[in-house]
Image (cartoon, grey):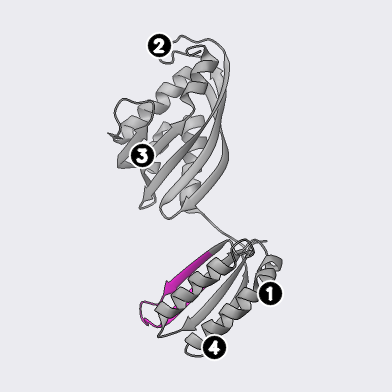
Amino acid sequence: MTFAQVIDFKTERFSDLDRLMDRWVEQTKGKRTASHSLLGKDRADGNHFVEVIEFPSYEEAMANSNLPETDRIFAEMVALCDGAPTFTDLDVVRNDQLNATTARRFFHEIATGGNLDAIDEVFAADYADHDIIKEQDTVVGRDEIRDDIIGWRSAFDFSFDLDRQICEGDDVVTLWTVKGTHTGDFQGLPATGKQVAFTGTTIFRFKNDMIQEGWWHYDVMGLMKQLGIAG
């Protein structure tokens, strides 16, 4: 079970503490077990800070706490704080990556499932699309992604396997594999009935819970070779 530790503290010397945290990151490189750290400042009190540190498990958190570097840095941290920091230990029982869920909805429900009506629910009206296979670097509008899905679905009976997703800020990166059968015209090539598989990466940037921009990078040459278009 994922574990999180919340550290609540006050300090008038945040710049010194910030440099101290940088030093801890450098000194524990290759040793620390923390997977993510988020530090926030109270809008109502500029000297009040809350840090949330994530770990793969409680046991990993304890191993991190037992590092000599952690002990030394913590002692220096306390000296910079107004009073002793407080700690709250949390077992994470739910962790929703809402943008990642929306991205998966595109791949599974829209692209593979063919629910084109859902495009208006998922993509912004001024969605900007970047695709390495297109002549134009950027094409704007939901109709572009709708036409793309119609074109790919008419050429292939396919499905997406989502190999990995990475979320950072407003971006969701999805590494995927497409597997399918060439059942219709593609780039002027009539249906061959050949089985194909190729990999790619899509970056979706979100705004107000909708996909605002997308970048597509995939193994076009590998697909062409499987279809006999390229040598």
Q: Nearer the viewer, mark 1 or mark 2?
A: 1
Q: Which residue is mark 3?
A: 120
Q: Earlier in the sequence, mark 1 or mark 3?
A: 1
Pointer 4 residue: 84
Looking at the image, tell me whether mark 3 or mark 2 is earlier in sequence order. 3
Task: Tell me the amino acid under the disc marked 4.
Answer: Ala
Q: Position of residue 178 (x, y in %)?
A: 54, 29
Mark found first going from the N terminus, 1 or 2: 1
Mark earlier in primary sequence (4, 3): 4
Task: Name which residue type carries label 2.
Answer: Gly
Q: Which residue is mark 2?
A: 188
Q: Mark 4 and mark 3: span between their CA atoms?
A: 51 Å
SS for dot 2: loop
Q: Is residue 128 visible?
A: yes
Q: Is residue 46 above or below residue 158?
A: below
Q: Which residues are magenta?
A: 37-51
Q: Name the residue tied to disc 1.
A: 66
Tell me the residue at 49%/70% (across/down): 22
Label 1 or label 3, whichever lies nearer to me, is 1
Give percent across and percent down for residue 44.
36, 80
Could you say which is closer to the camera, residue 77 or residue 155? 77
Comparing labels 2 and 4, the label whose residue is closer to the camera: 4
Q: Are marks 2 and 4 in contact (CB under 8 Å)?
A: no
